[in-house]
Amino acid sequence: MALSKKEVLASLESVHSPDGTSLPQSGVLSDIIVGDGKVFFSITVDAAAVKSWEPVRAKAEAAVRGIPGVTSAMVALTAERSAVEQAPRPAPQGRAQAHQAEEPMVPGVGSIIAVASGKGGVGKSTVAVNLALGLRDLGLRVGVLDADIYGPSMPRLLAIKSRPEMLGNRLKPMIGYGLKVMSIGFLVEEETPMIWRGPMVMSALTQMLREVDWGELDVMVVDMPPGTGDAQLTMAQQVPLKGAVIVSTPQDLALIDARRGIAMFRRVNVPVLGIVENMSYFLCPNCGARSDIFGHGGAREEAVRLGVPFLGEVPLHMAIREKSDSGRPVVVSEPTGAHAQIFRDIAAKVRDQLAVAGTGRAAPKIVIEA
């Protein structure tokens, strides 16, 4: 018989809040997501009470894992601040200063890089997965974290349909074409809307980083959600990012958003490893004529203007789209083809930029100047 939310709630009756109220009656539970033996929900409390609620979170997770038929469970503890606490003091000079925090590296992971875009629809996830595979082909041990909670792409891009297992109290990452992969898309059904507020998103990201058995990796590629919001700032603040790769198309509207992304990473002291111009041009498969559908060269010019490396041009091509949709990225499905070589060349430049970036970087803490 399929696992139900009612069974989960029943198991949580034995777990009590710090004031002695049973968890289902405490009013802190989010919607409970149940499917294929996987259970996911969050506990949302006041920020000042987080320490007293962490043991409750651990007991809740243990209780759910004890239900017959449950193969894995993830319980996120999210904190909310009052409106007064949330309001930042205005910075007279309109800028934030990045300071170094004593946040440890993700154990076993050499370098963590973010693949980001200022807007959606520029093919960022396709670039991220092929970049990761290109780094793999260079002999590196590579993992991929799908940080796009609202629109996870890695399950489809890597044709992974199974669910992660638990190793003790940690999730075991999925394996796709030699990459270790984790995505919220492995824990929920593909069409399930993730109607989550910022704190829950941030908690889920933190757990996918810290509570997954990543093992030993040379590079972790983080497929960021588009934009410059909570998820990006969480990654910049809580994770020692070695650098960021910005993906843009050539047209002016996309480049405006790419500038915002570059400015955000620079403001929090994350090196920009370079810009990739995706959908750079189109070659007609019949006549061979070239068409610059979105313009051409804008990202290269922007890289020069902003003083960041230009990593390469990826054409708009049916094979890249078709292979991505079928879960067989071109670096895997056409390893000797021209498109796979483009991504491997980009990967080599990223590897070289990582070498220049030095040995590790403590995660910055954003402090608003008074």
Image (tube, grey):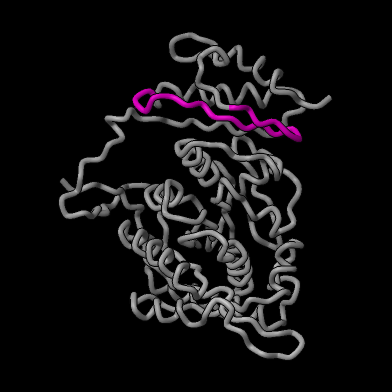
Where residue 47 sits in the image (x, y, percent)? 37, 28
Q: Quadrant of residue 273?
A: bottom left
Position of 32 compared to 96: left or right? right
Q: Quadrant of residue 170?
A: top right
Viewer can see residue 128: yes
For the N terminus, the image quarter is top right
Query: Camera-side residue: 67 or 152?
Result: 152
Give the extent of the magenta segment. Answer: 31-49
Q: On screen, 364 above or below 13?
A: below
Query: Camera-side residue: 282 or 77?
Result: 282
Where residue 307 sits in the image (x, y, percent)? 34, 77
Residue 48 is one of the magenta-drawn residues: yes
Q: Which residue is drawn at the image coordinates 65% and 60% (left, top)?
A: 179
Q: Which residue is drawn at the image coordinates 73% and 53% (left, top)?
A: 160
Count the marks. Answer: 0
Q: On screen, 252 above or below 37?
A: below
Viewer can see residue 111: no
Query: Camera-side residue: 61 or 7?
Result: 7
Position of 172 compared to 248: left or right? right
Query: Camera-side residue: 240 or 48?
Result: 48
